[in-house]
Image: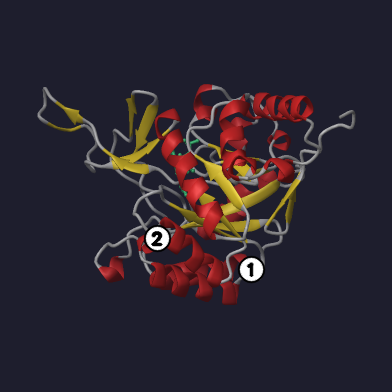
Amino acid sequence: MNSDPVLSVNIAGIKLKNPLVAASGCYGYGKDYLHWISPEEWGAITLKGTTLHSKKGNLPPRLVETPSGLINSVGLQNPGVDAVLEEELPAMQGYDVAVLMNVSGETEEEYVLLADKLSSVPAVSGIEVNISCPNVEKGGLAFGEDPPMVEKLISRMRQKYAGPLIVKLSPHGSNLPEIARAAEKAGADAISLVNTLRAMVIDIEKNKPVLPQNVGGLSGPAIRPVAVRAVWEVSAAVNIPIIGMGGITCADDALQFILAGARAVAIGTANFINPQVVKETVSGLEEYMRQKGYKYVDEMSGAARR
Ligand SMILES: Cc1cc2nc3c(=O)[nH]c(=O)nc-3n(C[C@H](O)[C@H](O)[C@H](O)COP(=O)(O)O)c2cc1C
């Protein structure tokens, strides 16, 4: 095969120059990384989780390292959607990169208000809906764990937001394909997964959990096999594209997600260790495509299941 591989992909109507997405919460609002790398290396960057009102976040410590992983308990610290739009979003304007907003709410109404607000912001290329948050109206059950709740929430957001709507799933629960189908039925344009896994570490000297909230979210290479399995299962269940993530550190890792059925991949924790990870991953993907004779990323997507 002599023609050059084409790295660009279309996700939910957004044209990405390559299939690499910066995962939410691991890339700030984009500008934090300018010193190390241009945002233009990415196909898209996802901004830090944003809520309707500002949130102070959780008490420190917020991070604990574990074997091949990281547990975080940031608690969605953010200045609220209005401040993000006014003070943070402009920093990414002028760069050739898609910008996704990652949104969370404590009630269905908050999600719907966020969708409505973002519907008139052209600088936002799409919304990623984090449904791993506890629903305060339903006694803390996460939105993403109940298919009817997912369908209702995403349908209501769909009515307010005509742009690309990506629903982000956690890997918990045995009904993951059902949850993904509920999102697709409600009009989601894409699924992203996985969010972090609930995890904890106990300090045996102090005789208590290390994190003040006890439980945090595990990310990094430790979760990769779980995430690849989740992508495999969901890609068999839906027809909309998938952005796969969880422990990707290099092209070989990213390829597992693509071969399992993802059209694009996101990198989170690995940016903390190696801010050049996106560049290295893109070159590695290109190299692999050349070696194997693939012209388009879509030809590889799901190849392990055929
Ligand atoms: C410090 C930290 C903050 C995060 N914040 C968010 C967030 O605000 N919204 C969200 O949907 N996911 C958030 N995530 C989850 C990541 O976007 C990603 O789904 C997860 O970490 C798995 O990918 P990774 O192993 O490459 O980090 C966060 C992860 C970390 C480590």
- Mark 1 closeness class: few <14, some 14–19, many ≥20 residues within 10 Å: some
Some atom of ligand 1 lies within 8 Å of the CB belonging to the residue at label 2: no
Q: Quadrant of residue 83?
A: bottom right
Residue 191 in view of the camera? yes
For the residues bearing labels 2 and 1, Cβ distance under 8 angstroms: no
Residue at 60% of width from left, 40% of height from top? 304
Vertical position of residue 273 compared to residue 268: above or below: above
Please name whichever residue, 219 or 112, is drawn nearer the observer in this view of the structure.
219
**Helix, strand, or loop for circle 1?**
loop
Q: Amino acid at mark 2?
A: Gly
Which residue in the protein does label 1 denote?
Answer: 119
Report how far apart the C-alphas of labels 2 and 1 lie in the structure.
22 Å
Residue at 45% of width from left, 29% of height from top? 221
Please name whichever residue, 15 or 304, is drawn nearer the observer in this view of the structure.
304
Which of the image's four quarters has the C terminus? top right
Q: Amino acid at mark 1?
A: Ser
Residue at 49% of width from left, 40% of height from top? 228
- Mark 2 closeness class: few <14, some 14–19, many ≥20 residues within 10 Å: many
Some atom of ligand 1 lies within 8 Å of the CB belonging to the residue at label 1: no
Task: Give the percent coordinates (x, y) of residue 222.
Answer: 40, 30
**Helix, strand, or loop for circle 2?**
helix
Q: Quadrant of residue 137?
A: bottom left
Which residue in the protein does label 2 denote?
Answer: 144
Look at discs 2 and 1 and give the one toward the viewer.
2
Colouring scheme, one of rainbow, by chain, secondary structure, one colour: secondary structure
Q: Between disc 2 and disc 1, whose residue precedes?
A: 1
